[in-house]
Image: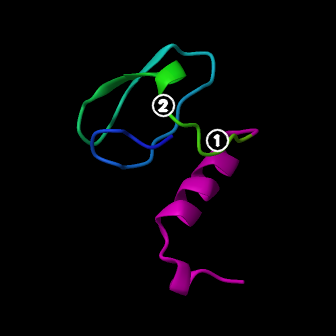
Amino acid sequence: MACPKCGNYSITRDTTKTHQCPYCGYVMRIEEVTIIARAKNGKEAREIILKLKTPKELRRP
């Protein structure tokens, strides 16, 4: 998910109702934010976040 206040990406379980942004501290309700991607496990979630943070021109095809 992307924080609506600072725009940084973070990971949370889909069973939680709220999540605090680790970057700016903003507390968001999960039902009110846009879910960018879903992952099967922590490793896959980290890979998704890394891909989102990498500029498009530096990504491997």
**Pointer 2 or 1: first along the chain:** 2
> Around disc 2, counting alpha carbons within 10 Å, would you say few (fewer than 14), some (14 to 19), or many (20 or more)?
few
Question: What range is drawn magenta here?
Answer: 40-61
Determine which of the numbered discs, if any, sits on residue 56 in the image.
Answer: none
Q: Nearer the viewer, mark 2 or mark 1?
A: 2
Which residue is identified by label 2?
A: 33
22 vs 1, left or right, is: left
In the figure, is residue 24 to the left or right of 27?
Answer: left
Query: Alpha-carbon distance for marks 2 and 1?
Result: 20 Å
Question: Which quadrant holds residue 26?
Answer: top left
Give the percent coordinates (x, y) of residue 19: 42, 24
Location of mark 1 (residue): 42
Is-magenta flag for residue 46? yes
Q: Is residue 60 magenta?
A: yes
On the image, the x and y values in percent for residue 49 come to 54, 55
Q: Is residue 26 left or right of residue 37?
A: left
**Three-letter residue code for mark 2:** Val
Tell me which amino acid carries mark 1.
Answer: Gly
What secondary structure characterizes most of the magenta part?
A: helix
SS for callout 1: helix
